[in-house]
Amino acid sequence: MNWKKLTQESQLEEIKSLSFNRPVLIFKHSTRCSVSSMSLDRMLRNWKEGDDEKLVPYYLDLVAFRQVSDRVEEVFGIRHESPQVIIIRDGKATYDNSHFGISYQDLMDQIS
């Protein structure tokens, strides 16, 4: 999986722009949370070759970049949770889920 690291608020404009061509996934991960680690691990184990062509995956480390996470909440109108996945399409959040609701198959169903 070729994550793009989300480390700057300015990248949110890039994400919006990219989402008009291909859905964008933002995975918000807390490096201090075991549930978040399990969700990330499940995502990585299920990720298949070629999925990067279906959507653009971004990884946001919530501990290191909390301000960026706060800005994601403001820009896309999605209440912060951790861990959390958000799909952006046509500049808007079209799907989000958190904790044990994070499912590789659900994400793939959302972009089909």
Image: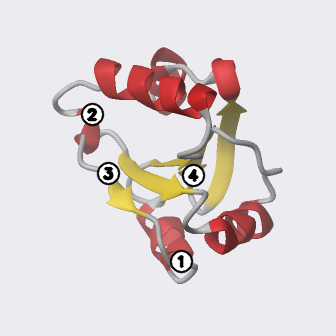
User: In this rendering, which labeled residue sits more in front, label 3 or label 2?
Assistant: 3
**Disc 2 residue crowd, few under 14, some 14–19, many 20+, Cα 10 Å:** few
As drawn, 95 above or below 68:
above
First in sequence, mark 2 or 1: give its number: 1
Query: For numbered disc 3, what is the local secondary structure?
Result: loop
Which of the two discs, 3 and 1, labels the residue nearer the N terminus? 3
Kindly state the secondary structure of the residue where label 1 is placed.
Answer: helix
Q: Amino acid at mark 1?
A: Glu
- The quadrant holding residue 54 is top left
Q: Is residue 105 above or below residue 85?
A: above
- Count of numbered marks: 4
> Mark number for residue 3?
3
Report the residue at 78% width, 51% height from top.
80
**Mark 3–mark 1 contact, CB under 8 Å?**
no
Q: Quadrant of residue 49?
A: top left
Q: Categorize mark 1 by other alpha carbons within 10 Å: few (<14), some (14-19), many (20+).
A: few
For the residues labelled 3 and 1, the Cα–Cα distance comes to 17 Å
Relative depth, front residue between 100 and 19: 100
The C terminus appears in which quarter of the rendering?
top left
Kind of element beneath mark 2 = helix
Name which residue type carries label 3: Trp
The numbered mark, 2 or 4, whose residue comes first in the sequence reads 2
Secondary structure state at the residue bearing disc 4: strand
Q: Earlier in the sequence, mark 3 or mark 2?
A: 3
Q: Which residue is mark 2?
A: 51
Q: Amino acid at mark 2?
A: Asp
